[in-house]
Image: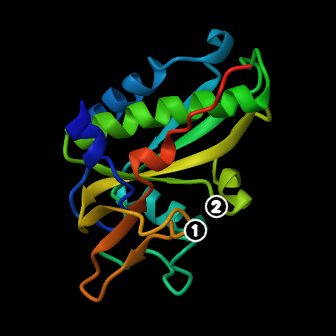
Amino acid sequence: MQEIIAKTRTFRRFVEKESISETVIRELIDLARLGGSARNSQSWQYQIVNTPEQCEKIFPFLGWAGYLSDWKGPVEGERPSAYVLCFLNRKWLRGSDLEAQFDLGISTQNLLLGAMQKRIGGCRIAAFNPKLASLFEKPDYLELSLVIALGKPRETVIVEECSNDENIQYWRDDEGVHHVPKRSLSSCLVSLKIR
């Protein structure tokens, strides 16, 4: 488990021509739906997009890397070969929107861990143009909240310890290797006295 978690990074460049079958994506969504859910609400539904034509329609609506402001996203040939769109079903919601977002984090982490086990990389994308939802004929009670890009990774992502707790920006070196600073375990632990 530790190895899969360590390998499950955010990938933003893919081998676009390597398709991902609907069967495989359904298996990943099955992992997503099994995650914990506040009040057992299970308020999320998922749209599979995995044909080149469909993926081409999705791509222009997406933002890719906030810290890499001069990078407009993967070039042709390095774009995702599939997407999973995450819709909040307001009819199914039994708690708050905040609880639903926690559930989405749990479910998508399950999905991405399962993807990495199959050597598929992914990227959660919440920075998208809201007009993306208008590509779909959908009822009003479904709200698009997150897009997950999927594909065979075409980049190396290295996790390294932060030089200090303030320097958390990811970056790319001259060879295109993506570096992700992580705070140390000791930085993440607190020792508070109980009253």
**Distance Cα–Cα, label 2 vs label 1:** 6 Å
Model colouring: rainbow
Q: Tag 1: Cα neighbours inside 10 Å, few (<14), some, or many (≥20)?
A: some
Q: Is residue 22 visible?
A: no
The residue shown at (44%, 59%) is 55
Residue 130 locus on image (x, y percent): 73, 58
SS for tag 1?
A: loop
Q: Are marks 2 and 1 in contact (CB under 8 Å)?
A: yes
The residue shown at (48%, 67%) is 164
**Sequence order check: which comes first, mark 2 or mark 1?**
1
Q: Tag 2: Cα neighbours inside 10 Å, few (<14), some, or many (≥20)?
A: some
- Hey, what amino acid is under mark 1? Gly
Residue 155 locus on image (x, y percent): 25, 68
- Image height of 83 relative to 100, above or below: below
Q: Nearer the viewer, residue 136 or 153?
A: 153
- Hey, what amino acid is under mark 2? Phe
Q: How many marks?
A: 2
The residue shown at (79%, 25%) is 96
Report which residue position mark 1 lands on. Answer: 63
The outermost residue toward the top is 40
Residue 177 locus on image (x, y percent): 27, 75
Image side of residue 86 versus residue 153, left or right:
right
Residue 173 locus on image (x, y percent): 31, 83
Task: Point out which mark residue 183 bears.
Answer: none
Image side of residue 84 versus residue 77, left or right:
right
Q: Nearer the viewer, residue 155 or 14?
A: 155
Q: Is residue 133 visible?
A: yes
Task: Point out which mark residue 128 bears.
Answer: 2
SS for tag 2?
A: loop
The residue shown at (41%, 29%) is 29
